[in-house]
Amino acid sequence: MGSLLPLSLLLLLAAADPGGGSARRRRAAAAPGPGGSSPAPSGTSAPFWVRISPKFKAVPPGGSVWLNCSSSCPLPEDSGLSTRLRRGGTLRGPGWVSYQLLDVRAWSSEVHCFVTCAGQTRGATATITAYKRPQRVILEPPVLAGSEYTLRCHLTHVFPVGFLVVTLRLGGRVIYSENLKRHTSPDLANVTLTYKLPARRRDFRQTVTCHARFNLDGLVVRSSSAPMTLPVLAWSPAPKALASTSIAALVGILLVVGATYCRKWLLMQSRGA
């Protein structure tokens, strides 16, 4: 009877915890290994990010720029830069690579940075813009001919002309605006805009200015000319001649009326005598 008691206790314990062995095996399998890290489940990979900086950069035509491509991947399998721009030097560090791009002349270029990590490839995109604000914005003194002013604005050494908007302002209001998108030259250019303004008395001695504005994917660049004053409208020879004729006619009428009145007065005086 004494030997049957331990055996019956063992049977009762086994019946109360039927999965105990498998639980212990699961805990043993999940225990950290000698290196201190748990093995990752098969078929999965940790997420990672890729960044490029700066994401937008404006340079003068023919200029160069450095772009930095970084990622959180600890062991990249591959990385690179996709662009049509000419490549220069390269610098590397832990988690980043910097690329130099030379002789940027296209007004807008996209640059794509990519990194491959654990079989996955991710990337980021930057935009490089080449532009040059007008070297000078010159508004000529307004020329009055007949009944209209000629306004002429010059813009020198500007690129890209096709993204330029030129505006003329009289006082505080816009009197003319033109988008120069018809110009497609890939080089620096000079532009002249001419506008005819009707001469009105209310505009005499008002100031006129010429304004140039770029809008390059959100980058707004403005330049302005020095103000010019509209000259006062002078009397032309035709109005002067008409005025002289009118005055002469009026004087003639007054003389005739005066002579008639004097004749009647003398006649009345003679009859009275």
Image (cartoon, helix red, strand yellow):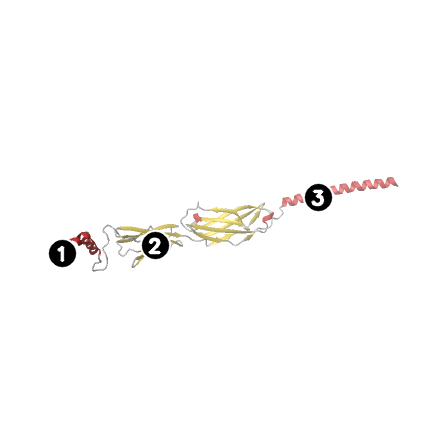
Q: Which residue is the site of mark 1? A: 5
Q: Quadrant of the N terminus?
A: bottom left
Q: Distance between the residues labelled 3 and 1?
A: 152 Å
* Callout 2 secondary element: strand
- Residue 70: x percent and y percent? 32, 56
Q: Which residue is drawn at 38% across and 50% down?
A: 108
Q: Which mark is residue 53?
A: none
Mark 1 vs mark 2: give the one in front.
1
Q: Distance between the residues labelled 1 and 2?
A: 75 Å
Closer to the camera in the image, 253 or 12: 12
* Callout 3 secondary element: helix
Furthest residue toward front: 1
Q: Which amino acid does label 3 sit on?
A: Ala
Q: Which residue is the site of mark 2? A: 52
**Number of other residues with Cα within 10 Å of mark 1, as a class: few under 14, some 14 to 19, many 20 or more:** few
Residue 17 visible within the image: no
- Residue 204: x percent and y percent? 59, 50
Mark with earlier residue (1, 2): 1
Horizontal relation, residue 271 to residue 135: left or right: right
Horizontal relation, residue 136 to residue 250: left or right: left
Q: Which amino acid does label 1 sit on?
A: Leu
Q: How far apart are marks 3 and 2 (CA)?
A: 85 Å
Q: Which residue is the site of mark 3? A: 248
Q: What residue type is labelled 2?
A: Ile
